[in-house]
């Protein structure tokens, strides 16, 4: 085992020196402004003179310009996200966010106009333009723009919506993050009252002491109840804005835009949920058995993340890093080398301290070819898995380094694949190294939690969001009704196998407030089952599979998911057969858990 010291604090100065007072970053923002000005001039010229068959050079110029601006904006937004995560009270960072938001709003407005111009271009002219050699690698995304343009909106409406997106809509999402980050709660641990951030309090869900888990759960529930009216306003405004914009765009279904963004057919999504609904019983059995092992008759929400072996072992950060590197090395040299670079060069913020954001994430910096991972590491195996999950996102960014700007934008459904795949590597390696049935049970329990989260918890989020949109379409939805919708959705998704669920899940689940990504729930489940299918092939081919895996990730920004899976796995994901393969592995885990625990006397 390696004995190297790794810092729990990241280094942002390597990206922009000086934090939120960085003159280097101000120059970056100025550069974005200049690039958007140039784009506006190009678009004005194109609006005056429609495209003709021999003017593919204009499209090439536009595509390259848009791709370049996208990279600059991504770099800027990632930096600001990191600054506000480490210090949510950084007012200078908040000011910078506003400046970048204005430029992003201007950019999105021009992008919408470009899409509309392409949509209105004569079909024969369009075909001739796409034949240009310089546009071959952009054909997928150009056709996607042409198909998904806001053809129902006037230029005035496009301008108005663009302005509102920056000044109001996205601001609600930022307000939510700022609000959650500002909350501290008092929880008694080992006889001592401690003031904790929301992130630290949520980490207590895997504490070995049930009383600590229970208190943390109800303290947070009480906190959400106190602020439910405020949070209900935020979620109502976000949802209401989307509904009104969708109506203007001629979009009738709340799922239409998320499916397009995920480059996925509704048939694929429905097939996935159908398979999941047919196989919930094994996971209900698992929840009941785990509750019995802990000492109850049914699974209480605050005990779900409890370690089934009641282990008090704390995992040091250095040991966690060494384990991750060791397990990654069993898959391939590229993944191991990448992770080693991330730990060695200060890409990870994992300090366990108050007054930092509660939300783990990975931020990509495409201009410098780096990523940053943010989390709170308190020494649990769950923390290790969170770290591995976010490193998977970072590895996806790494795989896309050689891809041009526009084709770096892969859908969320694929984004969750690399992160889940990385978890599978660690799970499998840890299971092989387990020295006892007790240790195997611990690892298997953690693995099954992922299945329950994806097949039950994520399903509850999906059901809630669908119902929220339906009711919000008729008017404001009260906090009381939001609680009811959440409870109904949880009971249905868990098939009644979860006791005392958090009816305030709609408050503390940040995905509902991601203004850029409505319905950021089903991509997790898609990515989970998709990753299982990929991992099965990886086990067949061994380390030789890493090259194929990297190619798949590189193609993820330039293909529909159905085509991507068919191209690289030879599978039809609109058929239940594909999803049954991944589900079979998960059901096998549940059955193995039941078998192992049937031979263990309670209180072992």
Image: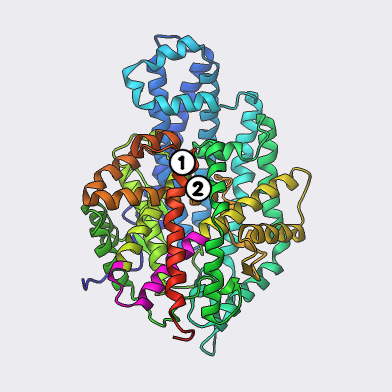
Q: Is residue 416 magenta?
A: no
Considering depth in this image, is 597 or 363 the residue closer to the camera? 597
Q: Are marks 1 and 2 in contact (CB under 8 Å)?
A: yes
Res 369 seen here = no
Residue under circle 2? Answer: 523
Determine the CA span between mark 1 and mark 2.
9 Å
Image vertical order of residue 62 relative to residue 467, above or below: above
Image quadrant assignment for residue 401? top left
Image vertical order of residue 447 relative to residue 193, above or below: above
Mark closer to the observer (1, 2): 2
For disc 2, the neighbor class at 10 Å (few under 14, some 14 to 19, many from 20) is many
Q: Secondary structure at mark 1?
A: loop
Q: How is the image coloured?
A: rainbow
Residue 61's disc number: none
Residue under circle 1? Answer: 411
User: In the picture provided, is 395 more to the left or to the right than 291?
Assistant: left
Q: Quadrant of the C terminus?
A: bottom left
Res 292 seen here = yes
Image quadrant assignment for residue 270? top right
């Amino acid at each position: 085992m390696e004995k190297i010291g790794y810092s729990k604090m990241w280094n942002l100065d390597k990206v922009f020196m000086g934090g939120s007072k960085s003159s280097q970053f101000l120059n970056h923002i100025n550069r974005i402004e200049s690039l958007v000005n140039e784009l506006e001039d190009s678009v004005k010229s194109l609006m005056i003179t429609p495209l003709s068959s021999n003017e593919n050079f204009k499209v090439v110029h536009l595509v390259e310009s848009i791709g370049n601006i996208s990279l600059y904006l991504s770099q800027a937004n990632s930096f600001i996200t990191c600054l506000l995560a480490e210090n949510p009270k950084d007012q200078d960072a908040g000011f910078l966010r506003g400046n970048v938001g204005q430029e992003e709003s201007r950019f999105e407005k021009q992008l919408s106009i470009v899409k509309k111009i392409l949509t209105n271009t004569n079909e024969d002219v369009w075909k001739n333009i796409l034949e240009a050699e310089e546009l071959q690698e952009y054909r997928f995304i150009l056709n996607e723009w042409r198909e998904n343009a806001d053809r129902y909106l006037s230029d005035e409406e496009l301008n108005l919506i663009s302005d509102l997106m920056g000044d109001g809509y996205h601001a609600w999402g930022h307000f939510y993050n700022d609000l959650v980050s500002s909350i501290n709660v008092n929880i008694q641990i080992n006889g001592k009252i401690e003031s904790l951030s929301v992130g630290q309090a949520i980490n207590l869900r895997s504490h070995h002491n049930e009383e600590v888990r229970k208190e943390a759960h109800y303290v947070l529930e009480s906190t959400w109840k106190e602020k439910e009216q405020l949070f209900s306003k935020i979620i109502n405004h976000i949802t209401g804005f989307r509904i009104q914009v969708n109506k203007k765009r001629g979009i009738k279904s709340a799922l239409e835009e998320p499916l397009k963004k995920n480059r996925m057919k509704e048939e694929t999504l429905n097939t996935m949920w159908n398979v999941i609904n047919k196989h919930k019983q094994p996971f209900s059995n698992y929840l009941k058995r785990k509750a019995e092992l802990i000492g109850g008759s049914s699974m209480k929400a605050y005990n779900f993340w409890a370690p089934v072996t009641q282990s008090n072992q704390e995992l040091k950060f250095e040991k966690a890093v060494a384990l991750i590197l060791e397990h990654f090395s069993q898959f391939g040299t590229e993944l191991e080398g990448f992770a080693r670079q991330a730990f060695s060069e200060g890409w990870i913020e994992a300090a366990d301290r108050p007054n930092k954001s509660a939300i783990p994430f990975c931020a990509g910096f495409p201009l410098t070819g780096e990523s940053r991972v943010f989390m709170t590491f308190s020494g649990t195996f769950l923390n290790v898995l969170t770290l591995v999950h976010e490193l998977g996102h970072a590895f996806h960014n790494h795989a896309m380094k050689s891809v041009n700007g526009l084709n770096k934008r892969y859908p969320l459904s694929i984004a969750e694949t690399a992160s889940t795949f990385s978890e599978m590597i660690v799970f499998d390696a840890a299971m092989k190294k387990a020295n006892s049935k007790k240790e195997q049970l611990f690892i298997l329990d953690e693995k099954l939690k992922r299945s329950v989260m994806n097949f039950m918890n994520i399903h509850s989020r999906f059901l809630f969001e669908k119902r929220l949109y339906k009711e919000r379409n008729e008017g404001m939805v009260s906090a009381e009704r939001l609680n009811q919708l959440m409870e109904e959705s949880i009971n249905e998704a868990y098939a009644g196998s979860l006791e005392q669920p958090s009816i305030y899940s709609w408050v503390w689940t940040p995905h509902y407030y991601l203004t850029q990504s409505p319905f950021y729930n089903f991509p997790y489940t898609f990515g989970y089952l998709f990753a299982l299918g990929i991992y099965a092939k990886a086990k067949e081919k061994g380390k030789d599979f890493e090259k194929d895996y990297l190619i798949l990730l590189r193609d993820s920004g330039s293909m529909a998911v159905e085509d991507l899976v068919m191209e690289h796995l030879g599978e039809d994901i609109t058929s239940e057969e594909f999803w049954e393969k991944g589900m079979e592995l998960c059901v096998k885990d549940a059955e193995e858990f039941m078998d192992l625990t049937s031979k263990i006397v309670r209180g072992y």
